[in-house]
Image: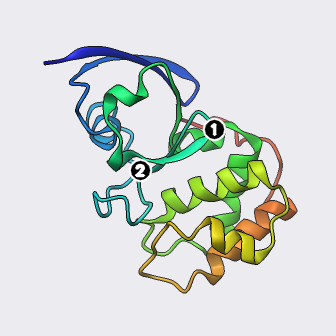
Amino acid sequence: MSTDIEFELNGKPVRIATPETRRAIDLLREDLHLTGSKEGCGAGECGACAVLIGDEIRLACLMLAGQLAGRRVTTIEGLPHSALGARLLRAFAEAGAVQCGYCIPGMEMAAFDLLRREPDPSRERIREALSGNLCRCTGYVKIVDAVRLAAAGDAGPESPPDGAAA
């Protein structure tokens, strides 16, 4: 049985009819066509589906659609709309931190969450903040480098790129 769920998604109001027990990751990817968040494990172990719910990083594979009601949801598609998010995305590209790319949206969401709370974290603190995100392609060095680059503000201009899309 479907019910109307209303929430804010990447700065825009959304109203969608869906079963409240539908997983949030499925709602985002299949119904709302926001495919940046990935389902890597479906069990909350890999971090590929990380999104912000209000000011908390959460795993969309472990959330139900009904839990989004009345909340502010930010997915990887929403990051380019903030100066910090745009800078972080550029830093990942500039540092060569993106390999296959599957884990990167979750890594970037976790890094964004960290940098908005701690603008100049140590490498150790970055590793700790990213510890819930698994990557099978890298030793994490370039990912940590990218977060440091974004923290230093060395990843291009501060403003979001023109025409940044959700």
Residue under circle 1? Answer: 55
Tag 1's secondary structure?
Answer: loop
Q: Residue furthest bottom?
A: 139
Judged left or right of residue 1, residue 44 is: right
- Marking on residue 37: 2
**Residue 24 location in percent, x, y?**
33, 38
User: Is residue 99 at least partly visible in the picture?
Assistant: yes
| Position of 99 relative to 106 (above/below) | below
**Residue 9 location in percent, x, y?**
50, 28
Tag 2's secondary structure?
Answer: loop
Q: Estimate the spatial distance between the alpha carbons at disc 1 and disc 2, rounded to whole Å.
A: 17 Å
- Marking on residue 158: none
User: Is residue 154 at least partly visible in the picture?
Assistant: no
Judged left or right of residue 64, residue 48 is: right
Q: Nearer the viewer, residue 70 or 102?
A: 70
Give the position of the N terminus as an image quadrant.
Answer: top left
- Which amino acid does the dot numbered 1 rest on? Asp
| Position of 57 relative to 150 (above/below) | above
According to the image, what is the colour scheme of the structure? Answer: rainbow
